Image: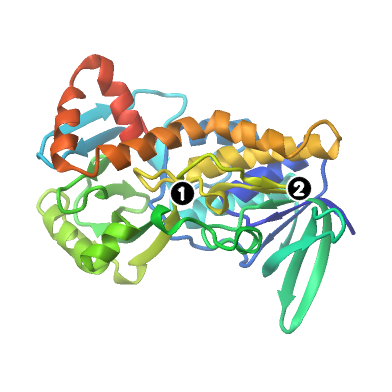
Amino acid sequence: MIHDVIVVGSGPGGAVAATTLTQQGKSVLLVDRQTFPRDKVCGDGLPIHVMLMLREMGIDIERDGLEYQRVTGLTIEAPSGKALSTEEITDDAFSMTSPRLSFDNVLHQHAIKSGAQFEVMNVIKPLIDDKSKRVIGVIERRGKEQIEHEAKMVIAADGATSALARAMHGRTADPQAIAVSIRAYAYLKKPMPSCVYFYFTRDLLPGYAWIFPTAGNRCNIGVYLHNQDYKSRGADLEALLDEFSARMQREFPHEIDTPTRQTWSLPLYADRHSRSAPGLLFVGDAGGFVNALTGGGIYPAMMTGQAAGKIAAKILAGETSEAEYDVAWQRDVSGSLGRARLMQKHILSSAKIFNSVFALANLPILRGPMLRVMSGEHY
């Protein structure tokens, strides 16, 4: 069977793309290397825009059994030790944290309920027509065999180590645009406020550390560093996490669940180069849609997944070309990701500059925009 679209990767970007397409009557083969539910190491933060998009897709977090913790506040501490805090005052929708084991599964199951066919598949490269050079499907590795699967379009949502991106571009991201993180879940010894805490300490700039509560009387605690800084310092991520954990014990006493301590890399947004090829659209981490300041990628993945789904449907109808996808993501996400990149590069690289700019954020006209950029649109 030749499907309308094969979506490779059933994380947030791929699942949203698949749902968007099936809701428009398209036949979708959704593939992933793993069955669901499956865990995905992540910071787990979901800004309010995520809930709004879930509702737009027809997902009810209570009915569909999402495991989550509501976020009611945000605190950002500068290297100077000064902090800015805000409350999220809304009843209809809210920011939250949710383990990816639960969040990704809810999106994945919704895509299947919407009509997507799912298969576990190890996709190793795109299937390309020799004459037109258009992507016309994917090639799966199954044991020693390579099996071709044809489709009219392909959406690549196969993450930071995207096999499709490597096949098309030779690499998934510029080495200068890579970050690394470590996170762990920890058991709280006493309840903590439902607030996200970001600590931009002098020794971590332009990275930061975080801690916030998550479901099940636990918290998510972690450290985020840019790859070039991590390598030049010879830093030990586990030691940095232990140091931060020790610092937090007085205010937020906790015990780290050692098996959950994991590291991962993030392909950061760096420029506005095309994220499409004939017959192929890249979304989420596979397209490098990760906030360079915070390392957040869930909401950009969902946004680009939705855009890719809508535009793929139009391409199939002969109404547009892949070029419209580049217009769409540049309109929808490049502004916020570009601002975060500039701030990370020119402000967070210096504690002195950061402290000076942070002090100005007390001005009412700057407070909101500053908090939005620094928190990855959580506020």
| Residue at which label 1 appears | 67
The amino acid type found where label 1 is placed reads: Glu
User: Which quadrant holds residue 30?
Assistant: bottom right
User: Which residue is drawn at the image coordinates 27% and 58% (left, top)?
Assistant: 229
Compared to 287, does 119 lie above or below? Answer: below
User: Which residue is drawn at the image coordinates 71% and 82% (left, top)?
Assistant: 143
User: How many other residues sit within 10 Å of disc 2, few (<14), some (14-19) or many (≥20)?
Assistant: some
| Residue at which label 2 appears | 278
User: How many other residues sit within 10 Å of disc 1, few (<14), some (14-19) or many (≥20)?
Assistant: some
Can you give x and y, in whole percent of width and height, for residue 283 in the image?
A: 60, 47
User: Which residue is drawn at the image coordinates 27% and 50% (left, top)?
Assistant: 207
Looking at the image, which is closer to me, 121 or 165? Answer: 165
Which residue is most to the bottom? 144
Mark closer to the observer (1, 2): 2
User: Which quadrant holds residue 6?
Assistant: bottom right
Looking at the image, which is closer to me, 321 or 85? Answer: 321
